[in-house]
Image (cartoon, helix red, strand yellow):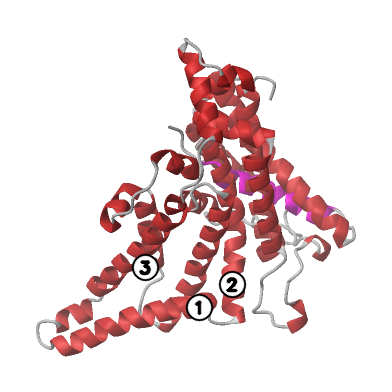
Amino acid sequence: MSDDNHIDEPQETSEGAAGSKLFQDLTGLGVDWRSALLVPALAILTALIVGVFVIAFTDLEALRLWGSDPGAAWSKTWGSISGGYKALFVGSFGSLRAVSETMVGATPLILGGLSVAIGFRAGLFNIGTEGQMLMGGMVAIWVGVTFQLPIFLHLPLALIGAAIGGGVWGAVPGLLRAKTGAHEVITTIMLNLIAFNLVVYLLKSGIFQAEGRDDPISEAVAVSARFPRLFGFLDDSQVRVTAGIIFAVLIAWLIYWLLFKSTLGFEFRAVGMNPHGAHYAGMNVVFLYTAVMAVAGALGGLAGADQILSILYRGSPGFSAGIGFDAIALALLGRSHPAGVVAAGVLFGALRSGGQVMQVETDLSIDLILVVQALIVVFIAAPALIKAIYRVRTGRAAEQLTTGWGA
């Protein structure tokens, strides 16, 4: 950049010092693998350990047995714990169908997590992924129902439309933050509510509503607009994973390149670390805030498109299924890094898939999986606690880079 020299030179003003420190922070520090990998792994392990105690202390029948027959109580408690975690693993990775369901669940989570993560990198808290998914999904439905095209044209057109729909929805709070100072947490929450009610209205309109239906259900999108199944040749309807997972990983790689290999990505991270320093360095903060929220919205729109084009094939109220809110936890777990978001998406997809099997094959409730997910988020959000428990020492500045939060 032409203004880099201004950042390098020591200045007497506070703005000059901020610009110099910003450049040093972004270019002179590496990523601490302990912050990026070890601490999240230990947080997951700790959550699973605490989950053991949750299982033990919520089994009322076993608790009653401890007073009269400790041996039987221990046998029943251990059976619940080992059986539950075994079913969780088998349901997640124990067969082709299990892996398929894990990938099906992971795909929209990855895209949604990237939507939140890129906002974190720019110092913005995008809680609007849910609404962005809804708007992007609706555009994907319209394209999928309205046009009759070959799949090599129809599917990309539906995805581009979803990205535009979500991007426009995301750009609005970015522009409001840049121009008026309106906090993106408030504006994105309000836009979520608007999106949900707008979807209900549109699904009852003649543009979307399925013929012969009185409820808000859309027509099914054309086959040419759907992601093809990866194992369609098996003729097994239970193996549902589609090319959407490949698309999500490619998008994650693209976001990695954008953030860490491009000038625009450098500016996104710069404004996230210090908007005043970025402005001093000659960056257009208004454009960057708007652009990063537009990209975040586009990613959210693609997550909504995957829900339609890979899984549901038609729209209904709330088809986003709360994924936009789970994406916040996903971005935190992935340390706002695309590779971490992909890994966290697979983990959450595995918990969802395995949790359903665990509920069927044991007496444990699916709510236990939600408890484990919540525990993971709690321990990820408290890295100091994990470091204290396991005596892990990390570099503070490197951790800031991996988490995406500023100094």
- Of the residues tagged 1 and 3, which is closer to the observer? 1
Q: Secondary structure at mark 2?
A: helix
User: What residue lies at 65% left-to-right and 19% top-to-bottom?
Assistant: 3
* For the residues bearing labels 1 and 2, Cβ distance under 8 angstroms: yes
Amino acid on which disc 3 is placed: Leu
Q: Which residue is mark 1?
A: 91
Q: Inspect the image, locate mark 1, and give the three-letter code of the amino acid beneath it.
A: Gly
Q: Amino acid at mark 2?
A: Glu
Graded by Cα atoms within 10 Å as few (under 14), some (14 to 19) or many (20 or more), the crowding at tag 3 reads some
Instruction: Give how far apart the Cα atoms at labels 2 and 3 are.
Output: 19 Å
Q: Which residue is mark 3?
A: 368
Q: Secondary structure at mark 3?
A: helix
Residue 101, numbered circle: 2
In space, the residues marked 1 and 2 are separated at their CA atoms by 9 Å
**Residue 42: image location, x then y, percent:** 37, 60
Rendering coords of residue 35 (x, y %): 42, 50
Q: Which residues are magenta?
A: 127-146
Q: Is residue 364 above or below residue 1?
A: below
